Image (cartoon, grey):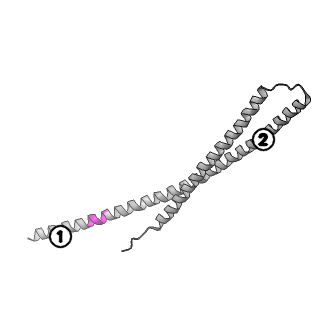
Amino acid sequence: MARHRDPMESVARVRRVRERDSLLGLLQAHREADAAHERHAAVVARLTHDAATAVVPADAAAYTASRLALTELERHGTQLREADESAGLIAAAAQSHWQHDRVRLEAIEMLLERRTAARLAERRAHEAREQDEIALQTWVRGAGA
C-alpha cells in the first residue's frame, strides 16, 4: 500500500534546501568580506608604517620615485577599501536572505508540527473511543450473565 505523503513535507524539503543554500552563501560572503577587510587593513598598515618611517630622499629623482610609489599604494588602498565596503554590503544582503529563508522554513516546520500533533490527538481520541466501546461491550456481557 502506497504511503500518503503530506504535500507540506515536499514544501518543507524545498525550504530546507533553500535555507541551507542561503546559509552556505552567507558563510561564503562572510569569508570573502573578512578576506577583503584583511587585504585593506594590510595596505593601511603598510601606508601607516611607510609614512612613519619615511626618510626624506636626498635627490629629486628618489623623492619623485618614493612619491609615485606612495601614490600608487594609496590608489590601491582606495580600491581595496571600496572592495571591502562592497563585500560588507554583499554579506549584509546574504544575511538578510538567509534570515528570510530561515523564517519561511520555521513557519513550515511549525505548521507540520501542528499537523502532526493534531493527527496524534485524533488517533488518541479514536483509540479512546475504541477502548470505551470494548469496555462497554465487556460490561454489557458481564451484566447480562
Residue at 34% x, 64% y is 122
Give the residue type that dot 2 points to. His
- Location of mark 2 (residue): 76
* Image vertical order of residue 30 relative to residue 9, above or below: above
Name the spot of residue 110 as percent of width and height, x first: 46, 57
Residue at image position (49%, 59%) is: 108
Between 32 and 123, the one lying in front of the other is 32
The outermost residue toward the right is 60
Look at label 1 and name its amino acid.
Gln
Helix, strand or loop for disc 1: helix
Q: Residue 47: where, in percent of width, then height?
A: 76, 33
Residue at image point 74% right, 44% down: 82
- Residue at figure coordinates x 23%, y 65% from the top left: 131
The answer to whether one can see residue 60 in this image is: yes
* Magenta part of the chain: 124-129
Q: Is residue 13 left or right of residue 34?
A: left
**Going by the image, does 65 lie left or right of 137?**
right
Q: Main secondary structure of the magenta part?
A: helix
- Examine the rendered structure and indicate whether residue 118 appears above or below residue 38: below
Asked if residue 70 lies left or right of residue 13, the reply is right
Disc 2 is placed on an element classified as helix
Picture coordinates of residue 84 (x, y %)? 70, 43
Residue at image mark 1? 137
* Displayed quadrant of residue 69: top right
Magenta stretch holds residue 92: no
Q: Quadrant where the N terminus lies?
A: bottom left
